[in-house]
Amino acid sequence: MAVKQISFTLPEELYEEVVKAKEESNALSLAQFVRQIVLEKLDEWRWERNLAELQREVRESGGLELGETNEQVIERLRETRRQIFEIEYAHLYR
């Protein structure tokens, strides 16, 4: 795997906080600890980006059509739950 290096500076207070957090973790080195944080943040960013893309696609396709009011949404969810029960589980109770 190819590796590229990034160098950056931190304010002293933030650096000290990172060092303290590293000492409380199981990381072997400061570099390993920072790499872990970057990977976690990147995963979070990917998830948020994918969620935003999914939300955009749903909007563009007309939405979920759950209803306008809380009561309409609840009724739609109940109907969906009933349909799932009928398809997947009703035969177990007959």
Image: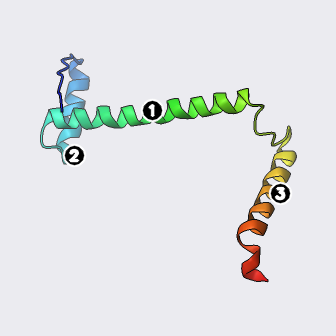
In the structure shown, which secondary structural element does the residue marked by tag 2 occupy?
Answer: loop
**Pointer 2 residue:** 25
Q: Nearer the viewer, mark 2 or mark 3?
A: 3
Quarter holding residue 35: top left
Label 2, label 3: how far apart the Cα atoms are: 47 Å
Which residue corresponds to the image point at 71% horizontal and 68% vertical from the top-left?
Answer: 88
**Pointer 1 residue:** 46
Can you give x and y, in whole percent of width and height, for residue 11 in the image? 24, 17
Quarter of the image with the N terminus is top left
**Pointer 3 residue:** 79
Q: Earlier in the sequence, mark 1 or mark 2?
A: 2
Other-residue count near label 1 (Cα within 10 Å), few / some / many at <14 / 14–19 / ≥20: few
Q: Earlier in the sequence, mark 1 or mark 3?
A: 1
Other-residue count near label 2 (Cα within 10 Å), few / some / many at <14 / 14–19 / ≥20: few
Residue 7 vs 31, above or below: the answer is above
Which residue corresponds to the image point at 37% horizontal and 32% vertical from the top-left?
Answer: 42
